[in-house]
Amino acid sequence: MSSVFVIEDDHQIRQLAVQALADAGHVVRAEATGMAGLQGVIDSAPDIVILDLGLPDVDGRDVLRMIRAVSDVPVMIATARDDESEIIEMLDAGADEYLVKPYSGAELEARLRALLRRIDSGGSARTIDVAGLHINLRSRQVVLDGAIVTCNRKEFDVLAFLASRVDTVVSREELYAEVWREPYGGADKTIDVHVSWLRRKLGETAAEPRYLHTIRGVGLKLITPT
């Protein structure tokens, strides 16, 4: 079972997709507009996104680019646009699959299964495991001791960056440059706020840290609990 997010403005097609995927055992969420869909993808971190291009508020090509700016979740384009140049453009822009309308629910689900098989065959290089903490970089999902931890975009990026350098001290300057993509400029408060939120979600405190340790005057370190 996988989590799927459908961004499709046509009510009938959206219902067909949701029903077919749900009947196949997937957990499905859907939105009818590009911006609502983008926010939904960020909030729910699905395993795969099915994206129409002809959306009422913003072109699906722009939605794809915005998704790619914050996530590498697999995206299947499902649209009536069948021009070869458009297909090539979307695949080059980061789409993983392209399905032309009209399609049946059975074909959609089969394409989705095939895409998931290709992803699974790529191995687990896109996950980070530190003791009971599991971070899926592709779906942007965090699981702690078997329970899902809901993180916003920056919280996830901070956690993933520190976890990718487990047991290594990371300076605040480096963390801010990598996550916020801006010069540091003394952004201690910004970092402290996000680390504080993360600690709360990970069930720890600054006084009694489990994963996130502050190295005074140096930076931060995510350690492997003993």
Image (cartoon, rainbow, N blue to C red):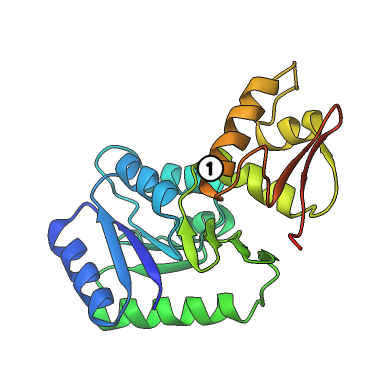
Tell me, yes or no, if residue 143 can be seen here: yes
Q: Left or right? Give the position of 138 relative to 5.
A: right
Residue at the spot 68% in from the left edge and 66% down from the top edge: 129
Q: Quadrant of residue 177?
A: top right
Residue at the spot 69% in from the left edge and 31% down from the top edge: 181
Q: Left or right? Give the position of 190 relative to 220.
A: left
Give, as a three-letter code, the residue at label 1. Arg
The extreme front residue here reads 207
Tell me, yes or no, if residue 104 can be seen here: no
Q: Which residue is mark 1?
A: 200
Q: Left or right? Give the position of 7 relative to 86.
A: left
Q: Residues within 10 Å of mark 1 (few under 14, many from 20)?
A: few
Residue at the spot 49% in from the left edge and 47% down from the top edge: 67
Measuring from the top left, give residue 185's x and y in whole percent.
75, 16
Measuring from the top left, give residue 16's x and y in whole percent.
18, 70
Measuring from the top left, give residue 152's x and y in whole percent.
49, 42
